[in-house]
Amino acid sequence: MAGVAPGGSGSGSDIYRGNGPRLMLPVWVFIGIFLLLPVILMAVYSFLTKEFRGGVIWDFTLAAYDQFFLNRGLFGDEPATIEWTYIGIFWRSIWQAGLATVFCLLIGFPTAWYVATRPASTRSVWLFLITIPYWVNLLIRTVSMKFLLRDTGPLNEFLMWTGLISDPLSLINTNFAVQVGLFYSYLPFMVLPIYAAVERYDFSLSEAAADLYCNNWTTLRLVILPAVKPGIVAGCILVFVPSLGAFLAPDLLGGAKTFMIGSLIEEQFKGAAGNWPFGAAAAMILLTLVMVVLLIHARVQVREDR
Amino acid sequence: MAKTDIRRFAGFRATTWLCLLVLYAPLVIVAIYSFNASTSITRWGGFSLKWYVDVFSGPEAPKFRAAAINSFAIAIGAATCATIIATAAAVAMNRAGRFRGKLASLALINLPLMVPEIVTAVASLIFFITIGFKTGLLTIFVAHLVFCIPFAYLPIAARMKSVPDMFEQAAMDLYATPWEAFRLVLLPLMVPGILSGFLLAFIISLDDFLITNFVKGAGIETLPTAIFGSVKQGIKPNIMAISTLLLGVSVVLVTLSWLIGRAGQNKK
């Protein structure tokens, strides 16, 4: 339930020996054909020529990537300069996702620590309370946040009632609202892996540090944080990666000025100005970014395990 | 001098409460306002169930009913198939010794968790269009089945790891075939894990918006896509009522899954 894959590297029991490939066949058929193959096909599409009103012509070209990175003027005859529009959208997405990760960490770490240090009897209830929102429909959660942040919504009403503000704040359609939405969407993803790491933490290390006259905060910095680092890194990845490609939070809480990668890609397939190869290219660039993050993480993990 | 508690940090408890407040406040507020008698969505006009009545018999009721039937039918189908596939995969990973492609298989099971949802959505749409598969209920079902597999797999594999294989060994010493050992011995022991896996896959399917929105085809809606379409024109009170209902379904199912998991652990 914590979203951490149990390792499968050990050979374990072998009482059904010889049946492995047969039992795995459905996984290969379904995930292989309906996910791996489509992703490969999408990579091919990013090198095709666009057809107007959606679809593609099977002529190979680099036009989609050219359009993404280079500006050749309105008629394509000027010397190429770097096109900042799409790089800018990616940069904003990386920035927003990074910021959401930092805020999730600031709230998520103390929460995970507190929950993990509860007595065993109440711990599972605490953990359950943190987990529930993770399983509640993301769309409904985002709509709730939209309702809460509206100009005439409960948050503004509350702030005006307390007298902190006299006029409603316009929160919706801002980068701030998108940031709140991302933070809110992925906060449980931060808590769960850190919780798992703290639960495995050996508290005799803290005792040893205390015996050597470390105060609690020094112990946190020098002993605990390095010990639970794998959990923190896992949490950061689980927040950063989905935030980067998020669609609902920027679409429902943001406006035209808060455009993120997810909306850019979606627009190429749904909007009037559909351009499938360009959308496929943007999706490929996003996928590459995510895979780089995951690969670096996997390599560091392997090195530290040694 | 009393020794300071090495587990305690000032402010951590307050942060935890803040975290819970942030997580629950928006949901609780929407749930409260769904019982609002007033037509203006932010002014409180007293308690009423009229928006719930509206969901079931109002002008938009047929749309919501069709969407709900689609959503539940797809979730039941996708979760059932994903659970069967994930159980077979868990047996292969935990009970079948070494075989070629074992690590690659594990990576493949986890692939839907690693590829960003928007990328999966785009890739699925391109794939279905290219092979000439008409988008509709069947494409939604297949796409859901794929991303349900890892969610069903996690609790099932975790449970299987914690069940020692001595019972099956004993059964096979008494001349049970491998299939009988699986069906009569391992499967009953696996019930809590399989139920958790099914419920999680079911919730994940019921919740999906983005991938569904790409592969659903014109005129077919699930609850999330229908809600999204309405919200685009502004949040109406009946949307809050239907959201609260869906929220309730998720909470009940997660609680069930949690209780089943706990019961399974206690038995062990």
Image (cartoon, coloured by chain):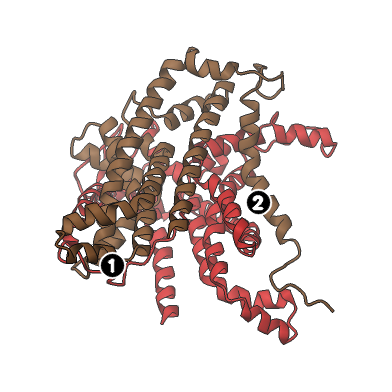
Name the residue located 27 percent from the left edge and 40 percent from the top edge.
Answer: B142
For the N terminus of chain A, the quadrant is bottom left
Q: Quadrant of residue A285?
A: bottom left
Name the residue located 27 percent from the left edge and 49 percent from the top edge.
Answer: A35
Q: Position of residue B99 (x, y in %)?
A: 19, 68
The subunit carrying tag 1 is B
Pointer 2: what residue? B19
Q: Position of residue A156 (x, y in %)?
A: 74, 34
Name the tint of chain A in the rendering: red
Give the SS element for disc 1.
helix
- State whether residue B184 appears in this view: yes
Whole-number angstrom distance, CA of label 2 to CA of label 1: 44 Å
The subunit carrying tag 2 is B
Name the residue located 62 percent from the left edge and 31 percent from the top edge.
Answer: B30
In the picture, measured across the screen, residue B251 lies left or right of residue A8, that is: right
Pointer 1: what residue? B166
Give the SS element for disc 2.
helix
Name the tint of chain B in the rendering: brown
